[in-house]
Image (cartoon, coloured by chain):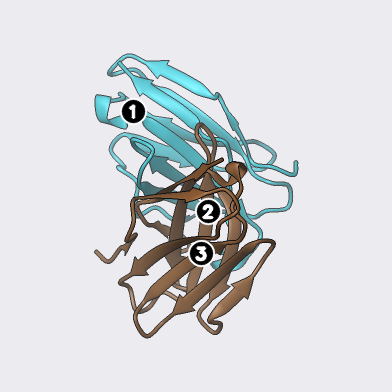
């Protein structure tokens, strides 16, 4: 598609439950990025992919977060055993350019952990 | 670590006036910058980018100025309209660096008075 698509728009989980978020990058974009935005403020980088390969995962809390970008499937971000502090809006961005230039963002998934 | 910041958290302007949103960055290795507009409940929308081999770049009603000497970036919006009301973020990265993720500033809320 011509826009980054993210589903679901909203997700509510009880503390300790699993959450899975999806992202379909713009068609033809090889690079996918996940960011977390808390309280409508700062963005925290989580992980990036070049096609199905992890490009940079320095921002990922690896003990509970995982992500994949498999061929012919939407990319996914999964949080095992969610915590209250995971409540945030999770954005996916994609780019066709190497080096992370011109990243275009999706509408985000709002995760609320109760 | 190094980060991008903003001088003004809020900016209120009259419709039709020009707006200037400022951003300071501290990473001297950053040489690629993007401005995003984020409306309430939406993802960041790409406005304009600039590389460090330029000091000015113009788009439709927007101009980005880069002063590498003082590590300062600004976004100028001409003839500001009510639809420009949003939070504006600057973001930086090292062009060609091994990490493709953007580092975002804190955001400036622009309010346009009719």
Callouts 2 and 3 in the same chain: yes
Distance in Å between CA atoms under marks 2 and 3: 10 Å
* Dot placed on the residue nearer the N-terminal end, 2 or 3: 2
Q: Nearer the viewer, mark 3 or mark 1?
A: 3
Distance in Å between CA atoms under marks 3 and 1: 31 Å
Whether A25 is drawn above or below A89: the answer is below
Protein chain holding label 3 = B
For the point 66% across and 43% down, which residue is it? A71
Residue A85 pos. (x, y %): 26, 30
Chain A, colour shown: cyan
Say which of B112 and A64 sits in front: B112
Name the secondary structure under disc 3.
strand
Chain letter of the brown region: B
Callouts 3 and 1 in the same chain: no
Whether B20 is drawn above or below B85: the answer is below
Protein chain holding label 2 = B
Name the secondary structure under disc 1.
loop
Q: Is residue A19 left or right of residue B63?
A: left
Circle 1 residue: A87
Check contact, mark 3 vs mark 1: CB within 8 A: no
Mark 1 Cα shell of 10 Å, populated few (<14), some (14-19), many (≥20):
many
Say which of B11 and B29 sits in front: B11
Placement of the N terminus of chain B among the 4 image quadrants: bottom left
Whether A15 is drawn above or below A33: the answer is above
Check contact, mark 2 vs mark 1: CB within 8 A: no
Residue B71's label in the rendered image is: none
Circle 3 residue: B75
Residue A37 pos. (x, y %): 39, 40
Distance in Å between CA atoms under marks 2 and 1: 23 Å
Q: Is residue B111 left or right of residue A61?
A: right
Q: How many marks?
A: 3
Protein chain holding label 1 = A
């Amino acid at each position: 598609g011509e826009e980054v698509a993210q589903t679901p728009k909203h997700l509510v989980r009880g503390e300790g439950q699993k959450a899975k978020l999806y992202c379909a990058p713009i068609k033809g974009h090889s690079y996918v990025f996940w960011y977390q935005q808390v309280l409508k403020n700062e963005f925290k980088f989580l992980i990036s992919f070049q096609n199905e390969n992890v490009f940079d995962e320095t921002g990922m809390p690896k003990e509970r977060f995982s992500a994949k970008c498999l061929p012919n499937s939407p990319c996914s971000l999964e949080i095992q055993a969610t915590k209250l502090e995971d409540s945030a809006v999770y954005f996916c961005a994609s780019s066709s350019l190497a080096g992370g230039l011109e990243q275009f963002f999706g509408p985000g998934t709002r995760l609320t952990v109760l | 670590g190094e980060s991008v910041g903003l001088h003004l958290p809020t900016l209120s302007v009259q419709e039709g006036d020009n707006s200037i949103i400022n951003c300071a960055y501290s990473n001297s290795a950053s040489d690629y910058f993007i401005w995003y507009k984020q409306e309430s409940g939406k993802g960041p929308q790409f406005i304009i980018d600039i590389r460090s081999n330029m000091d000015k770049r113009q788009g439709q009603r927007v101009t980005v100025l880069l002063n590498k000497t003082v590590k300062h970036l600004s976004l100028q919006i001409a003839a500001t309209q009510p639809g420009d009301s949003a939070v504006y973020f600057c973001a930086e990265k090292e062009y060609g660096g091994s990490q493709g993720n953007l580092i975002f500033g804190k955001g400036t809320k622009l309010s346009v008075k009719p």
